[in-house]
Image (cartoon, rainbow, N blue to C red):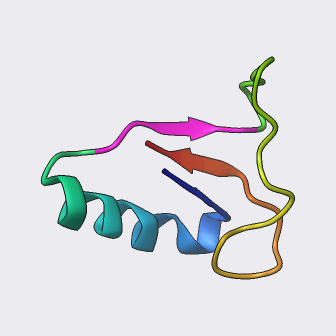
Amino acid sequence: MHVVCKEHLELAIDMFVDEYEEAPDIVDLEEVKFTAWEPPAHCERCAERGRFLVV
């Protein structure tokens, strides 16, 4: 699972495919809210706000 900004989305997809050898689901965190999970405040690769969840 990766939470990334738009700039690092392609990298996160590549990392997921390398690890699991299948395409990930991508969730836009601006459109979807989770009741039991709060996303990290920033991208795992930089200080930008994390916008996409790659699972």
Answer above or below: position of 55 versus 41. Answer: above
Q: Locate the C terminus by quadrant.
A: top left
From the viewer's side, name the closer residue of 10 and 39: 39
Q: Which segment is the magenta one?
A: 24-29
Residue shown at 79%/54% (left/top)?
Answer: 40
Report the residue that reaches farthest toward the top. Answer: 35
Q: Is residue 8 left or right of residue 31?
A: left
> Where's residue 27, x and y in %?
56, 36
Q: Is residue 22 left or right of residue 41?
A: left
- Quarter residue 32 falls in: top right
From the viewer's side, name the closer residue of 29 and 44: 44
Report the residue that reaches farthest toward the bottom. Answer: 46
Residue shown at 22%/62% (left/top)?
Answer: 19
Report the residue that reaches farthest toward the left. Answer: 21
> Where's residue 31, x and y in %?
74, 28
Q: Is residue 7 left or right of residue 11?
A: right
From the viewer's side, name the closer residue of 55 and 28: 55
- Quarter residue 11 falls in: bottom left
- Quarter residue 37 falls in: top right
> Where's residue 35, x and y in %?
80, 17
Residue shown at 51%/64% (left/top)?
Answer: 9
